Image: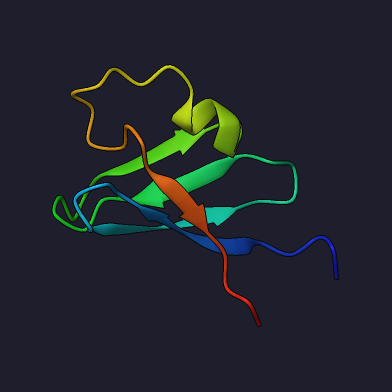
Amino acid sequence: MADQVKPFQLRLTDGRVWLGAEFPDGFVCVHHPDQPTICTIAVSLDALLADLPPQHQAHGATVERPTT
């Protein structure tokens, strides 16, 4: 079942959590709950978090994956 979408949480430094999904080819989609019609898409988790300026909401965020 390695070809399944893998959920994750992006925990922002201010305590908010954005939910995301990582697809089998590596690209990710992250939902911004405070902006209901906005999602960020990136080619990978590394690309999503790379080189974010200090004022960006996701700067310093950590990725958490379910343990089940």
36 and 6: which one is in front? 6
As displayed, is residue 54 above or below residue 59?
above
Q: Which residue lies furthest to the right in this view?
A: 1
Tell me which residue sits at (46%, 31%) in the image.
49
Q: Quadrant of residue 59?
A: top left
Image quarter (top left, top right, bottom left or bottom right) of the C terminus: bottom right
What is the total number of numbered labels drawn onto the structure image? 0
Q: Residue furthest bottom?
A: 68
Q: In which quarter of the image is residue 44?
A: top right
66 and 41: which one is in front? 66
Answer with left or right where residue 48 lies relative to residue 24.
left
Answer with left or right where residue 47 lies relative to residue 57.
right
- Residue 14 in percent (x, y) is at 19, 50
Image quarter (top left, top right, bottom left or bottom right) of the N terminus: bottom right
- Residue 8 in percent (x, y) is at 52, 61
Tell me which residue sits at (74%, 51%) in the image.
24
As displayed, is residue 21 above or below residue 58?
below
- Residue 29 in percent (x, y) is at 47, 46
Tell me which residue sits at (55%, 26%) in the image.
47
31 and 45: which one is in front? 45
Answer with left or right where residue 60 lies relative to residue 7.
left
Tell me which residue sits at (18%, 56%) in the image.
36
- Residue 7 in percent (x, y) is at 56, 64
- Colour setting: rainbow
As displayed, is residue 43 above or below residue 14?
above
